[in-house]
């Protein structure tokens, strides 16, 4: 897969999406979002891909949106446009397989919102995360006001959004914004190790589990429990469920086929 602003590599069932605009600290513009949206759809439908890592490389994740592209936009243009950032991040969030963000350096504004669309976030100890849009007279418009409160609670999310301040990787871990903090030289290795662990599980069960969590967050508890039960029940029609339980009873590793 060849793209203008990202690199995509698939190895051992793990797809890695690397933002590739180093000259502007991986700033996110409409072309980046177009490429991310296409990659999300392609990888999501590729049965050979079992997990996805998204990274900006070993210097910076993404320093935010391309302000030069947005500065002259009017309210009418923004309100009637096709919302490329929300579309791309929604597609990434709903890839039916685990998505891990490997964050080194800055993950600011749209970069932070991109990380929020992943299922799991691993940060290098030099990472800084934040939503500084308020300092530009705007608010996070790529899902930040919705995903961040659902992840860390409304009080902490409002503090970050209202102040526009950056936080360290350790503080991000403390408040639950990232799952793990490692040294920069261990970042990709740790992300790959986690992706391989996820990929060894049953692909259908993983997709159902992700759907149950994501959809359940949009429902009240009663509806969420009903949706969980539906997903749980459907898995008993899969070959992987039969293999998983048989392997458990036979005290051997399961050999899942994604069926």
Image: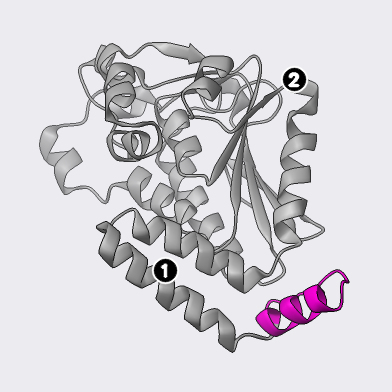
Report if residue 94 lies within the magenta region: no
Region rendered in magenta: 240-259
Residue at the image position 68 percent from the left and 86 percent from the top: 239
Viewer-side residue, 188 vs 77:
188
Place of residue 245 in the rendered image (x, y in percent of width and height, measured from the top left): 72, 78
Residue 125 sits in quarter: top right
Depicted 136 relative to depicted 82: above or below: above
Location of residue 4 in the rendering, given as x and y in whole percent from the top left corner: 58, 44
174 versus 119 height, above or below: above
Any part of residue 199 in sight: yes
Name the residue carrying label 2.
183
Checking the image for residue 172, the label placed there is none
Label 1 crowd bin: few (<14), some (14–19), many (20+), radius 10 Å: some
Establish if 127 lies above or below 179. Answer: above
**Which residue lies at the image location 27% right of the left edge and 24% below the top edge?**
155
Give the quarter of the figure containing the C terminus: bottom right
């Amino acid at each position: 897969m060849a793209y203008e602003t990202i690199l995509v590599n698939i190895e051992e069932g793990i797809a890695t999406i690397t933002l590739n605009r180093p000259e502007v600290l991986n700033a996110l513009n409409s072309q980046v979002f177009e490429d991310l949206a296409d990659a999300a759809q392609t990888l999501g439908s590729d049965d050979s891909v079992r997990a996805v890592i998204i990274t900006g490389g070993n210097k910076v994740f993404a320093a935010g949106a391309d302000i030069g592209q947005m500065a002259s936009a009017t309210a009418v243009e923004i309100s009637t446009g096709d919302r490329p950032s929300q579309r791309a991040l929604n597609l990434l969030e709903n890839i039916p397989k685990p998505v891990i963000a490997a964050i080194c350096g800055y993950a600011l504004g749209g970069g932070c919102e991109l990380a929020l669309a992943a299922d799991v976030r691993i940060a290098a100890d030099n990472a800084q995360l934040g939503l500084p849009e308020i300092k530009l007279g705007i608010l996070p418009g790529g899902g930040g006001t919705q995903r961040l409160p659902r992840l860390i609670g409304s009080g902490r999310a409002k503090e970050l959004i209202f102040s526009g301040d950056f936080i360290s990787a350790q503080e991000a871990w403390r408040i639950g914004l990232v799952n793990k903090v490692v040294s920069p030289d261990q970042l990709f290795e740790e992300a790959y190790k986690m992706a391989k662990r996820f990929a060894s599980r049953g692909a259908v069960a993983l997709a159902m589990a992700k759907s149950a969590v994501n959809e359940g967050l949009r429902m009240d508890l009663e509806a969420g429990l009903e949706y969980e039960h539906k997903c749980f029940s459907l898995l008993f029609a899969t070959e992987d469920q039969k293999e998983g339980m048989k392997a458990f009873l036979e005290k051997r590793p399961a050999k899942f086929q994604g069926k």
